[in-house]
Amino acid sequence: MEAGIGGTTLTGRGWGKLEGMTTTGLRRDELAAFLRSRRARLRPAEVGLPDGVRRRTPGLRRQEVAQLAGMSIDYYIRLEQGRGPHPSRQVLAALARALLLTRDEREYLFRLAGEAPPPSAGPSRGVTPGLRHLLDAMTETPAYLVDARYDVLAWNRLATFFVGDLSAVPVDERNMIRWMFSRPFPEDDPELLRFARTTIADLRAAYGRWPGDPAIAALVTELLGVSPPFAALWAEHEVSERRPTVKRVAHPELGPLEFECRVLHVPETDQRLIVYVPEPGSPTQAAFRRLAERVGS
């Protein structure tokens, strides 16, 4: 009998190592190794358990993981030994909670079990200290951080000359797309139209990634009802993450500027760091430096 035909395990020795994969997509050996590695990295205090007596090996005991996940110790042992029944989605979710898995680790756990991972709760609005420090360190470059629906979450001092000082603006009103379409939209401006088109394509991509997110759905519903230009662009169904573009701005204070609008995607939070990058030695770079000296003095 050929490997994987009429049986339950695919060996595939002639085409690479696939030992332990069942016809349901469950990779038993990899799942077992992953569970053992995640158990070994945890300390009892991290999951609310007392350290107790001295442990011969690092990490939690098997019975402790089983207790935290609400399953029998025998069932969990069989999972770590690469045998036993196919774990249900409920079992996988319980293991992810018990082992304090990150979002990426939880998705990996479900994939190893041959299951589609459940959707995450929603895009993050939290600003990590690292991103905050990065923004502050860019003293000669305007930069700001937005979430998946383009709410501005954080910004540096130079960015206030382009997006305004948002500290006095209510948090739920700091949305770039709403700003763009809440005023008469100049459809004869090709640069603004290109910017709007790429932004909406990125918003639609987020709309697809987070189908249950109420904030994204509410923004789309609101703008469909009040902005025909938004509705027309939304109806084109373009889906694409933002790419860097060259922007030309007639700034009322700094004069004509030209820079690359670089959009850096932050995968773990689905946020975007938007940075205005001038060409080295250009008049725009000189203008940014003069502005930095002024606000820093």
Image (cartoon, rainbow, N blue to C red):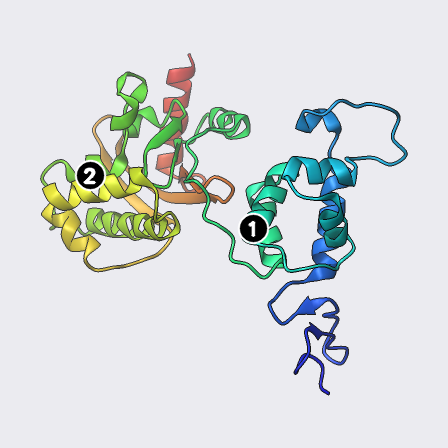
Q: Residue at x 63, y 43 (%)?
A: 95
Q: Is 195 situated left or right of 83 in this image?
A: left
Q: Residue at x 20, y 28 (%)?
A: 252
Please determine whether, in this image, residue 146 is positioned above or below residue 15.
Answer: above
Residue toward you, 114 or 161: 114
Q: Which of the 4 image quarters holds residue 157?
A: top left
What residue does disc 1 label? Answer: 107
What residue does disc 2 label? Answer: 180
**Residue 164 location in percent, x, y?**
27, 24
**Crowdedness near tag 1: few (<14), some (14–19) or many (≥20) residues, C-alpha within 10 Å:** some
Q: Residue at x 55, y 52 (%)?
A: 89
Residue type at mark 2? Met
Q: Residue furthest bottom?
A: 1
Q: Residue at x 27, y 33 (%)?
A: 175
Q: Residue furthest top?
A: 297
Q: Is 251 situated left or right of 264 in this image?
A: left
**Residue 254 location in percent, x, y?**
27, 28
Residue type at mark 1? Glu
What kind of element bears circle 1?
A: helix
What kind of element bears circle 2?
A: helix
Q: Is residue 231 visible?
A: yes
Report the Cα–Cα distance between label 1 and label 2.
36 Å
**Crowdedness near tag 2: few (<14), some (14–19) or many (≥20) residues, C-alpha within 10 Å:** few
